[in-house]
Image (tube, grey):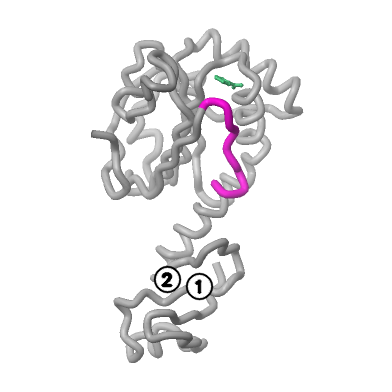
């Protein structure tokens, strides 16, 4: 069975473009954007790697470390990174796991045999500083991921953790948030002195500043 939201992200030790890492050691105290791609030297993957690198400052601002993975070797990754940097106008610095034995890809259920027996699909795991999986997302090989959404969901998770709120559909930073039904009106008055708006007893909005 695959990994689920709320599970502890399993640890592993493996070679990357930045040397061997022990995943739990490497990620200690940080959020992680762990994502697989099918193969080096392929077009959509090149754009995704470039985008992740271009957004390095945005990930850092949120305390998030990106970690890529494919079933290619370190040598292949390093050669391809030159192409990524050249074509995507960036300077890629985050590590990419070289999972040539598919050890981690299988541990994280990134190989979907109906799509490919050997290459990983485009999996995303957002993992919190306690190593808990907070979001999973799987994209097919032929569709690049939306990095605006990846940053948005990290913002939403961090806002939820900070203020004990939930985020509505299409929420963006600065938008109204939702008071969970588990919080009584009395508790909400204490917790949200800025006030809240009741649309239905189960649908109450307030505002917070991340
Ligand atoms: C790509 O990155 O373009 C790609 C990789 C594997 C299958 C399909 C597309």
Nearer to me, 104 or 13: 104
Question: Residue 149: within the magenta?
Answer: yes
Assign a secondary structure to mark 1.
strand
- Quarter of the picture holding the N terminus: top left
**Outermost residue to the front:** 114
66 over 162 or under it: above or below: above
Is the CB of mark 1 within 8 Å of ligand 1?
no
59 over 12 or under it: above or below: below
Which label number is shown at residue 177? Answer: 1
Assign a secondary structure to mark 2.
loop
Q: Residue at x 43, y 45 (%)?
A: 30
Q: Is residue 191 left or right of residue 141?
A: left
Q: Residue 67 in the image: state x and y as whole percent.
A: 48, 32
Question: Residue 121: within the magenta?
Answer: no
119 over 92 or under it: above or below: above
How many other residues sit within 10 Å of disc 2, few (<14), some (14-19) or many (≥20)?
Answer: many
Residue span colored magenta: 141-150
Name the residue that disc number 2 marks. 165
- Quarter of the picture holding the C terminus: bottom right
Query: Badges 1 and 2: C-beta atoms under 8 Å apart?
Result: yes
């Amino acid at each position: 069975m695959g990994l689920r939201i709320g599970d502890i992200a399993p640890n592993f030790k493996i070679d990357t473009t930045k040397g061997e890492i022990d995943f739990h050691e490497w990620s200690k105290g940080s959020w992680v954007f762990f994502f697989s791609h099918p193969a080096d030297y392929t077009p959509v993957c090149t754009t995704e790697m470039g985008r992740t690198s271009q957004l390095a400052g945005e990930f850092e601002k949120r305390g998030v470390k990106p970690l890529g993975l494919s079933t290619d070797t370190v040598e292949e990754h390093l050669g391809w990174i030159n192409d990524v940097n050249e074509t995507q106008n960036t300077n890629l610095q985050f590590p990419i796991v070289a999972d040539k034995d598919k050890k981690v890809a299988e541990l994280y259920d990134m190989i979907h045999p109906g799509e490919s027996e050997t290459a990983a699909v485009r999996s995303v795991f957002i993992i919190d500083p306690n190593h808990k999986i907070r979001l999973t997302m799987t994209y097919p090989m032929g569709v690049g991921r939306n990095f605006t959404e990846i940053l948005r969901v990290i913002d939403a998770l961090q806002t939820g953790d900070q203020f004990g709120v939930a985020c509505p559909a299409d929420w963006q930073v600065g938008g109204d948030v939702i008071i969970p039904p588990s919080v009584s009106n009395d508790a909400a008055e204490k917790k949200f002195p800025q006030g809240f708006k009741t649309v239905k007893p189960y649908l109450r909005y307030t505002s917070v500043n991340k």
